[in-house]
């Protein structure tokens, strides 16, 4: 997020800086905390859902032996036809424009920061973390297996980019190392209600982003790349289903606290997981990458608003009953937020000016319009 972002009360008007919906990084993060620390008694909620998670969430994982692997979509280095297959891959990649490459690399770098995301889930309160590293608890089993499934995404995209020969792999590798070292601040404050709301939002965002990169790859004639991006998008959709089911269950057993957590998360704004991206050169790398993604329609401000509306509908927020006064105010806030976002974005688009071109180290310093 850019500096100048202000925390909103229930009745305050929405005022966001440029780039507010695509998650621009901020130089000095402003900590926006939940109204109160996570109540110890809420731990019992997750303890009571242990068997439910085993029966309803773990079943959404795919067995390793039935899972795709990166090598399924790449030239086989042990094959006599390896060099011909690589040559064909590189010929297809020549047709990919630089702005699309920037989006593809940005998505890949985000996937490669997976250790940070596993850490985020494991530091959540409420018995959902993996306190031993091999915990048999359903929440811990899910996090480890989810991580294992997600790990294939970065591996596959990284190998494809390496073989394609269109990008500066060393600069990309530096970006990944910088990002892993920087970490992330999703502003969930260790609260598992907010944590699972955050992951629900993010998995849908990555599903949309990878789906759009697949669509663009088809347009550019690289059907293999389209298949790669589409396969990753399908994983993200399945993971989205798991996280949204968790929050749906929280709304069922604890609607008041869950709606307050949802509203708190949306007031702070969902920060993109790679918001601290840096390549050693561009202090505004994430903002620049996000601007290119917005222009190409890979991930846009309207996508952000659509995800919000989708989750409000998916969790039936408008029809929640039995809420406290504060819960009802949170309910009203959430149900009106999507349309307000859209109005702000439409005004911003109406005032949009010609944006500059900037060099990206990922593509050997070639310039791309924002």
Image (cartoon, helix red, strand yellow):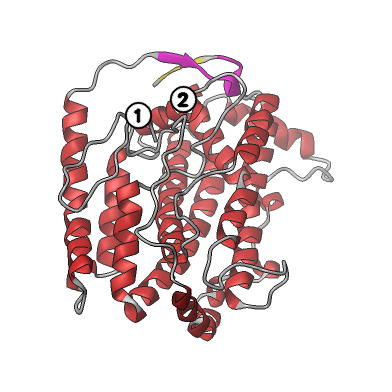
What residue sits 46% from the left and 62% below the top?
Answer: 191
Image: 211 above or below 335: above
Which numbered tag is attached to residue 283?
none
Judge from the rendering whether residue 174 lies leftward or rightward of residue 322; answer left or right: right
Residue 88 shows in this picture: no
Return the x and y of residue 38 as percentages of the image width and height: 44, 66
* Upstream in sequence: badge 2 or badge 1: 2
Q: Quadrant of the N terminus?
A: top left
Which residue is more in the foreground, 322 or 169?
Answer: 322
Density class for disc 1 (Cα within 10 Å; few <14, some 14-19, many ≥20) is few
Element carrying mark 2: helix
Are the residues at dot 2 and dot 1 in contact (C-beta closer than 8 Å)?
A: yes
Query: Where on the picture, by quarter, is residue 225?
Result: top right
| Left or right for 113, reference 104 | right
Which stretch did the figure color magenta? 357-365
Whole-percent x, y for residue 33 in the image? 40, 52
Q: Which residue corresponds to mark 2?
A: 99
Question: Total of numbered circles in the picture?
Answer: 2
CA gap, disc 2 to disc 1? 9 Å
Quarter placement of the C terminus: top left
Residue 57 vertical position relative to residue 35 in the rendered view, above or below:
below
Q: Is residue 227 left or right of residue 317?
A: right
- Residue 362 highlighted magenta (yes or no): yes
Q: Residue 317, located in which quarter of the rendered image?
A: bottom left
The residue at the point 21 percent across, 43 percent down is 341
For label 2, the crowd category at 10 Å Cα-Cα, with few meaning under 14, some 14 to 19 and many 20 or more, is many
Pick whichever, 84 or 346, lies toward us: 346
Taking the magenta stretch, the answer to whether it contains residue 235 is: no
Q: Could you say where residue 171 lies in the image, as x and y percent from the top left?
A: 66, 25
Give the structural element (helix, strand or loop) at label 1.
helix
Q: What residue is shown at x 42% (from left), y 14% (from top)?
A: 357
In the rendered image, which residue does mark 1 sit on? 295
């Amino acid at each position: 997020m850019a500096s100048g972002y202000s925390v909103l009360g229930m009745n305050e008007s929405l005022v966001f800086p440029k780039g507010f919906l695509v998650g621009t990084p901020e130089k000095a993060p402003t900590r926006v905390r939940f109204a109160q620390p996570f109540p110890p008694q809420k731990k019992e909620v997750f303890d009571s859902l242990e068997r439910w998670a085993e029966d309803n969430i773990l079943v959404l994982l795919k067995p390793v032996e039935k899972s795709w692997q990166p090598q399924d979509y790449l030239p086989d280095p042990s094959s006599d036809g390896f060099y011909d297959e690589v040559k064909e891959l590189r010929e297809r990649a020549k047709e990919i424009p630089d702005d699309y490459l920037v989006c593809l690399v940005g998505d890949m770098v985000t996937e490669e920061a997976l250790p940070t995301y596993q850490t985020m889930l494991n530091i959540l309160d409420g018995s959902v973390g993996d306190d031993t590293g091999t915990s048999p608890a359903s929440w811990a089993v899910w996090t480890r297996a989810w991580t294992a499934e997600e790990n294939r995404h970065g591996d596959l995209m990284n190998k494809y980019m390496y073989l394609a020969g269109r990008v500066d792999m060393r600069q990309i590798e530096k970006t990944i190392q910088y990002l892993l070292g920087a970490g992330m601040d999703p502003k969930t404050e260790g609260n598992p209600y907010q944590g699972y709301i955050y992951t629900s939002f993010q998995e849908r965002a990555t599903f949309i982003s990878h789906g759009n990169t697949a669509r663009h790859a088809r347009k550019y004639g690289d059907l293999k790349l389209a298949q790669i991006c589409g396969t990753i998008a399908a994983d993200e959709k399945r993971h989205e289903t798991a996280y949204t089911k968790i929050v749906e269950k929280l709304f069922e057993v604890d609607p008041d606290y869950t709606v307050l957590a949802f509203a708190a998360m949306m007031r702070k704004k969902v920060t993109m997981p790679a918001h601290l991206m840096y390549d050693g050169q561009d202090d505004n790398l994430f903002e620049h990458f996000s601007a290119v993604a917005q222009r190409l329609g890979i991930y846009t401000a309207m996508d952000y608003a659509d995800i919000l509306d989708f989750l409000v509908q998916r969790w039936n927020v408008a029809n929640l009953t039995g809420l406290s006064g504060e819960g009802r105010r949170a309910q009203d806030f959430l149900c009106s937020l999507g349309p307000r976002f859209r109005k702000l974005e439409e005004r911003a688009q109406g005032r949009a000016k010609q944006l500059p071109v900037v060099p990206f180290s990922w593509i050997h310093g070639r310039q791309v319009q924002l």
